[in-house]
Amino acid sequence: MTIELSTLSATQLDELIAAAVKRRAEMKPEPATQPPEQCEAIVNPAWHTSPLPQGVLFMLRHPGLGWLGFVLPHEHRVHLASLWLHQSLLHKPAAEPASDPATAPTPPPNVGAGGSGTLH
């Protein structure tokens, strides 16, 4: 089967991708349960999180697939927070030249402010 992707609109391509992803999820063998040793990664993707009764909604924006949503149980949220805090404490950023605080840029509001209901 050959589909000429260049003739599809963004909406048609989104529908094709959604149908292909749904079909792939039904097929055997299932995708690997362990992450690969190497992967293509999106640098600094937009993300969103909000609490749910059964856990937390965690969404990441992929430039080709759009918003991917995951519901994580509360204990996974705690585990991730602990892992990310540990990794942050171990991180040694490269030395930056000293800057004048009066001329330092002001970060936008809500960026890095905890995420609950905020788009990042």
Image (spheres, helix red, strand yellow):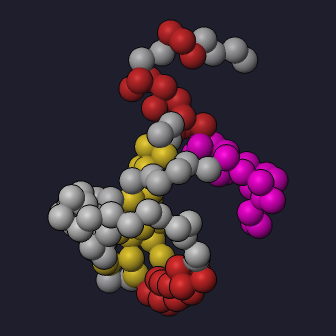
Residue 12 is drawn in which quadrant?
Answer: top left
Q: Say which residue appears at 39% left-offset and 53% top-offset.
A: 46
Q: Quadrant of the N terminus?
A: top right
Whole-percent x and y of residue 2?
Answer: 69, 14
Residue 58 lies left or right of residue 112; in this view the side is right
Q: Quadrant of residue 50?
A: bottom left
Q: Which residue is nearer to you in this view: 106 or 51? A: 106
Q: Nearer the viewer, residue 40 or 53?
A: 40
Give the left or right position of residue 79, taking residue 116 as reference: right
Query: Which residue is nearer to you in this view: 30 or 85?
Result: 85
Q: Residue at x 45, y 71 (%)?
A: 71
Q: Which residue is at 48% across, 26% downward?
A: 13
Q: Range of the magenta residues?
A: 21-40
Q: Quadrant of residue 22?
A: top right
Residue 106 in the image: above or below residue 79:
above
Magenta portion: prevailing SS class: loop
Left or right: where 113 falls relative to 60: left
The residue sitting at 30% across, 76% down in the picture is 114
Taking 95 as reference, is 83 above or below it?
A: below
Was residue 67 drawn as part of the magenta stretch in this picture? Answer: no
Circle count:
0
Residue 28 locus on image (x, y percent): 79, 52
Quadrant the C terminus occupies: bottom left
25 to the left or right of 86: right
Q: Position of residue 81 (x, y in %)?
A: 48, 84
User: On screen, 92 above or below 8?
Assistant: below
